Image (tube, rainbow, N blue to C red):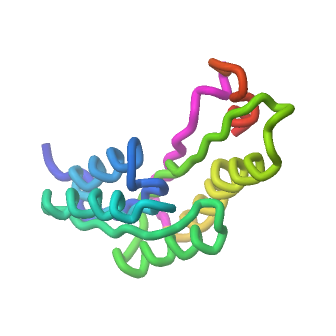
Amino acid sequence: MGKTLAGKVALVTGGSRGLGAAIAKRLAHDGAAVALTYTSLPQKADEVVLAIEAAGGKALALAADSADVEAVKHAIAETVKTLGRLDTLVNNAGVGAFAPIDQFSMDEFDRLVAVNIKGVFVATQEAIRHIEGGRIIMIGSVSSDSTPFTGISVYAVD
């Protein structure tokens, strides 16, 4: 199988661990240059970049908290500046906070909305200024269909 994404550039938010890291590596495997954002644990982001580079790919790690509008905008701009374009955005970054609704703090609520909703909106809004004929992929949770345990109702709102 060929490098179907050769010459393309992708940005994966929350790409330093878990599903985001797997997505970043797969995009690179398929030929895309990949930028990925992280909030904490820069060493995890560096591990993903090194794995992509060791396999012959090109990658860039960017510190960007998805709750920070300017950081999200900067990540998009830096991806375009450094890698030359943007063809795919994968909105993967997300946070979870779980508690019965009567015990859910406003700080937790604000963080959840800032990352899982506002951050996705801002990244998408900025990306469409650069993407022509590419893709914007949203990673979400099935929890909005059915809440599997007590305390997840606020998280499931997104």
Q: What residue do we see at 13% from left, 42% from top?
A: 1
In x, y percent, where is residue 55? 14, 57
Between residue 150 and residue 61, name the one nearer to us: 150
Q: Splitting the image into 4 quarters, where does residue 115 fall?
A: bottom right
Report the front residue among 79 and 85. 79
- On screen, residue 65 versus residue 47, left or right, reads right
Q: Quadrant of residue 143?
A: top right
Look at the image and say whether residue 137 sits in the magenta stretch: yes
Q: Residue 33 in the image: x percent, y percent?
A: 29, 64
Q: Looking at the rendering, in which quadrant would you find the C terminus?
A: top right
Using the image, determine if residue 83 lies above or below residue 143. Answer: below
Q: Over which residues does the magenta segment extend?
A: 131-146
The x and y percentages for residue 79 are 42, 72
Residue at image location 54% in from the left, 45% down from the top:
138
Residue 53's spot in the image, x, y percent?
19, 64
Front-most of 129 and 49? 49
Q: Residue at left 72%, top 50%?
A: 113
- Left or right, 56 with reference to 77: left
Q: Left of 81 or right of it: where is 69?
A: right
